[in-house]
Image (spheres, coloured by chain):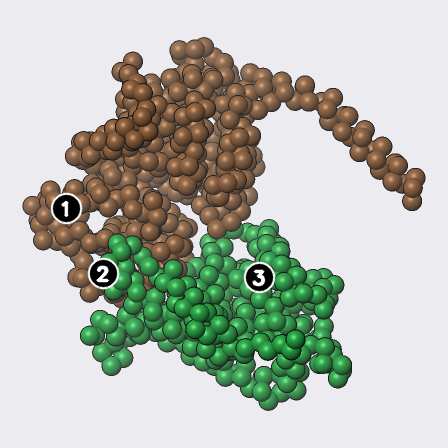
Amino acid sequence: MLFFLNVLTSGLLAGLMYAMVAIGFVLIYKASGVFNFAQGSMVLFAALTFVTLNEHGLPFWAAFPLTIVVMIAGAVLIERLVLRPLVNRNPNTLFMATLGLSFVIEGLAQLLLGTDVHQLDLGIDDIPVSVLGLQISAFDLFASAIAVALVAVLAVLFSKTRMGISLRAVADDTLAAQSIGIRLPRIWRIVWSVSGFVALVAGLLWGARQGVQFSLSLVVLKAMPVLIIGGFSSIPGAIVGGLLVGATENLADIYIGPLVQGSVSTWFAYILAVGFLLIRPAGLFGESAIERV
Amino acid sequence: MKLSKTLALFSALLLGATSLATLPSLAAEHDGEQLYPLFSYRTGPYAPSGIPQWGGIRDYFNYINEVKGGVDGVKIFVQECETAYTVERAFECYERFKNGYAGAPVAALFTTSSGFDAAVSEKARADKLPVVSVAGGREDAVDGNVFPYQFPLLFDYWTESSIVIDYIAKQVGGYDKLKGLKIATVYHDSGYGRDTIEPLAILSKKYGFEDIQIPVPHPGEQQQAQWQQIKEAGADWVFFRAWGVMTPVGIKTAARVGFPADHIIGDIWSGSEEDVKPAGAAATNYLAVSVYSPGVDFKISQELKKDIIDPGKSDLKDTSKFGSVYYNAGLVTAIIYVETLRTGHKKFGNRPLTPAEGEWALEHLDITAQRIEEIGATGLLSPLKVTAADHEGSPAAKIQQWDGKAWHPLTDWLNGDRALFHDAIFAKAAAYAKEKNLPPRDATN
């Protein structure tokens, strides 16, 4: 039983790490209805920028805000060069643009920052601590605390600030929002900047776990089922989806894997996601699209 | 506007005509040279392991061409083709270079990825082009009777399994002490990773240890469940067959569940600096099988330093990679290639070799300890003798340990118990020949 609980707990904590990546997708989807394929590349670019600055002698407190500035500059450029020319186009067009953008960002990351694998030490030991008899990683607890704090900040941002209300208005009806004076380019710049910030946080946590390297961009593969299950437009949904995916894939690997003599976690999360698509297409917390015809 | 369009069209036509006019000279531009198609991956997730390898290969060829005047006077002409470690792009490169390029013929193709290696097998057979996979490739291809055009040279994962068990046996006080021991293999769930399931079952049956097999899905960025399973099973040792990001994540996760690093033995592709540095302190005392000894103290390394690295002629942008595991892997590959050409030159004369001559040269390759000493690669490369019937040679590896800053060899070359697997491997090759209805080949000459 203790083993089961250990597997379950570690899965839940890993799920929060997935949710960190998923939140970046949710932010942009909420504001523009676009699935940002480049989110994984942004995670890679942010972490590589941070670690490069750090390796050049900048301490954490200087490298972190400087990386945020870089991500904001990137958001402004993306809005100006990619999104603005495509305003009011079909969401599929914007999706394809983000697909291209992901290749550009990855290429730039390798060109400017190199292909080396970097160690990233955030000063949090990745060692087990005993909590109620369960062996839990101190680092996982730290990452979970960061995820919860981030969700809390974003929830306040969306529900209490003028900017958040503007974002929600754009998400509900872009044309109506524009008609009452909300400036779409500004909203996009802000939301891509916030998404860049989330990418940095996710990149640092994943980078500390596996090293900062190109494969960081592949963590988006874990975020996809999280988004499908939680809903593309819900931040709490990303958290719940992350927890579900993390726990089930861990348990599936232990209890179903041996039956099929192979690892199952990668596709099991997607099977779960497909199940949700059949039963609840908008995900647990997503908003169903209603269109008048 | 119209004038500028006409001018642009005229310029394009002129450029096209000029290009066509230069084609015949390009075709013969590298006459008398030997083509080495280098299927590189300087971009993508595997670039960190690729770039130092291409550095090792190109630096050695540069040294041979510039300092030694070529291989018996024949210059090596490298044509690089970026694959980003994808099979489809590697196939494009293959089609581009299989018949040679600019007058330089290809003698053998040294592949650089497991996926392409498996996929190109039948194509290379049809094209009669020797395909060499240094320390990789399909296991049953050692049978030259069935696979005349494939050469899984130097090392294989079956022998690696026996080397790992041999090392563990020595640590616990002998083979008889293996009985009852629990040895887990944590493997990348791919063809490469699954390659050791069969030999470990054979070894387990022979020595009586409990064989635990645990797969990790690609890319391996999350392994908590697997390492908890290992802890729960009470494994004594772990044979860790990882690749890419799976290695540092596994080492860190092992530390997190309290499994000691000095009881984890990494595969040859889990034992580079790039594999352990991201894991930080958790990797201290981690062990790995090593075919490519790191270091710069080898005589050949010193010569490269003097003639290539220090004068700024290296392919490496970051020369701190000089002497790393992957750099030396490239160096070993390049040495084997050059020695293959030398073998062929003795039979066919000092000129570029054709694929048929390259095949002959590979099947008669004999790099003795004395020759290794002459090259200045003692300790870097183990003796290698290939025959028409045995396309691998004499596999050997060391066990090395990471001290937090560098790798250190713990053993000399270990050969493993290859004979134990002989029947199983050759039976697989025979089954393949039967399935494909391949005509028998007499590979005794």
| SS for callout 1 | helix
Q: Give the residue displayed 50% in from the left and 74% down from the top.
A: A282
Query: Looking at the picture, how far across and down is residue B153, in whole percent?
Result: 34, 30
Residue A200 pos. (x, y %): 53, 68
Residue B230 is marked as 2
Q: Chain of mark 1?
A: B
Q: Chain of mark 2?
A: B
The quadrant in which the C terminus of chain A is found is bottom right
> Marks 1 and 3, how far apart in space?
47 Å
Look at chain B in the picture and name its colour.
brown
Q: Position of residue A283 (x, y in %)?
A: 47, 74
Mark 2–mark 1 distance (CA, rounded to whole Å): 17 Å
Which residue is pictured at 58% across the width and 72% down the height?
A: A29
- B301 over B405 or under it: above or below: above
Q: Identity of the amino acid at label 3?
A: Ala
Q: Which mark is residue A149?
A: none
| Residues beneath discs 3 and 2 located on the same chain | no
Q: Which residue is painted at 84% across and 35% down in the image?
A: B9
Residue to which mark 3 is pinned: A38
Residue wearing tag 1: B204
Q: Residue A195, image x and y in percent? A: 58, 71
**Circle 3 marks a residue in which chain?**
A
